[in-house]
Image (cartoon, helix red, strand yellow):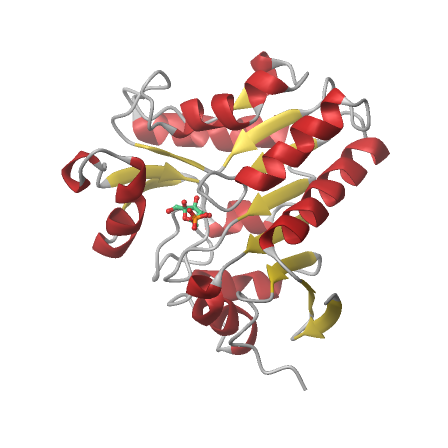
Amino acid sequence: MIQTVQINGMETIVKADAEQASRLVADLIAAQVRGKADSVLGLATGGTPVQTYRQLIEMNRSGQVDLSGVTSFNLDEYIGLDGDHPQSFRAFMNEQLFDHVNIDPARTFVPDGCAADVAAHCAKYESMIESAGGIDLQLLGLGHNGHIAFNEPGSPRDSRTRQVDLTPETIEKNARFFDAIDDVPCHAITMGIATILDARQIVLLATGAGKADAVAAMLQGPIDESHPASLLRNHDHVTVVLDQDAAGGLRLD
Ligand SMILES: O=P(O)(O)OC[C@H]1O[C@](O)(CO)[C@@H](O)[C@@H]1O
């Protein structure tokens, strides 16, 4: 089943399964880069984009997409983990994508979870994005509680890159990547809602039945800071890519 629908102004594409949804997202990223070799990509971590990154690796190896001119900025990083820590988002990105494609490592940026002056680092991250020309395409996952990046419920719509506290729910969900829940950092650096909304195009990928409620609230609930992903409806170029399970809570009439 392939279905493309407009839901409250958001182009929503429902694919049969997570693999097909991930392939479509890889195709959208590749199309962006083919159209503009020096594209600035905003990238995400978490379980959701892993298959998309595998597809991109394959496409890069087979010459279907050249990432040598691309600059990337990741959404977030745990406070207290340096880039060598196996559970840091920098290590995740290196393992899942950067080490396997021809992107220039010097042009891959992830917030520094061990920055001595976090506020100054966040301000610099914002100015680096601006100096790079802004983000052409921002890839997003979706938290079960509606978070985007680490913008938890209640995050202000005008928020920019900053230090945040993680909710107990997010810590619990992300504990699967750590040996023990007590190892999960309680704080992170994240791009803000306004930083994300500055991207020229946003592609949000959500898969699995566990995301169905968050997807329905994002697309068909109130636009409200209590569900940060709903604020994406204030952007005019968002593509939501779902598998059937993640679309299961939508009213499609
Ligand atoms: O893709 P997952 O692992 O379900 O995570 C969803 C979201 O949660 C985060 O991992 C943060 O908790 C985001 O980076 C991601 O978009």
Quarter-wise, where is residue 65 in the image? top right
- Asked if residue 128 can be seen in this view, the reply is yes
Image quadrant holding the C terminus, namely bottom right
Identify the residue at image location x=43%, y=31%.
123
Identify the residue at image location x=39%, y=51%.
151
Q: Is residue 202 above or below residue 107?
A: below
Residue 223, percent across and down? 50, 72
Q: Is residue 227 above or below residue 67?
A: below
> What is the residue that sits farthest to the left in this orientation?
182
Identify the residue at image location x=44%, y=28%.
92
Quarter-wise, where is residue 76 in the image? top left
Residue 188, percent across and down? 31, 38
Q: Is residue 193 above or below residue 123?
A: below
- Asked if residue 133 can be seen in this view, the reply is no
Residue 19, percent across and down? 62, 49
> What is the residue that sits farthest to the right in this orientation?
35
Whether residue 167 sits left or right of residue 192 in the image: it is left
Whether residue 82 sits left or right of residue 241 in the image: it is left
